[in-house]
Image (cartoon, grey):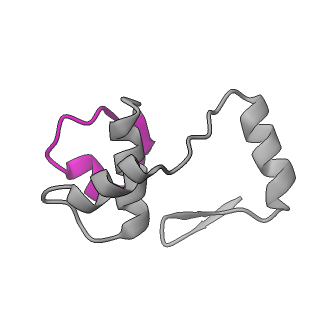
Amino acid sequence: MGSDRGRITIHADVVPWRNTVLRLGINELPITGEIAITAARLLDFHGDPADRLITATAHVNSAMLVTADGRILAWPSSLRRIDARR
């Protein structure tokens, strides 16, 4: 794995990587209609659709969001977040 412009790049076949992540106990959450609507309605949030979906998924599922994205971390809301840069 490497990073380019602060983004994670996976230099391996994603299927075995995903299987490893799931075995480690990470839960996959599907994007539902409720999540899509929540993403569209996020107030004072930037326009990146992936960030909106990630944030809305955490919100709808009352999950803790672990992120290194400064814009998500700085967003004023009650969303529980952990700064992954630390």
Which quarter of the image is occupied by the C terminus? top left
> In the rendered image, is residue 23 in sight?
yes
Left or right: where does residue 80 sit relative to residue 43? right
In percent of width and height, residue 22 lies at 73, 36
Residue in view at x 68 percent, y 27 percent: 25
Q: Is residue 68 magenta?
A: yes
In this rendered view, identify the residue nearer to me: 7 or 85. Answer: 7
The residue furthest front is 33
Residue in view at x 83 percent, y 62 percent: 12
Q: Is residue 34 magenta?
A: no
In percent of width and height, residue 52 lies at 34, 59
- The image shows residue 86, relative to residue 14, as above or below, that is above
Residue 14 location, quadrant: bottom right
> In the rendered image, is residue 86 in sight?
no
In percent of width and height, residue 1 lies at 71, 58
Left or right: where does residue 80 sit relative to residue 18? left
Residue 11 location, quadrant: bottom right
In percent of width and height, residue 53 lies at 41, 56
Residue 82 location, quadrant: top left
Label tally:
0
- The image shows residue 18, relative to residue 48, as above or below, that is above
- The image shows residue 36, relative to residue 80, as above or below, that is below
Residue in view at x 64 percent, y 33 percent: 26
- The image shows residue 56, relative to residue 28, as above or below, that is below
Tell me where the magenta segment starts and ends, as one range: 65-86
In this rendered view, identify the residue nearer to me: 51 or 32. Answer: 32
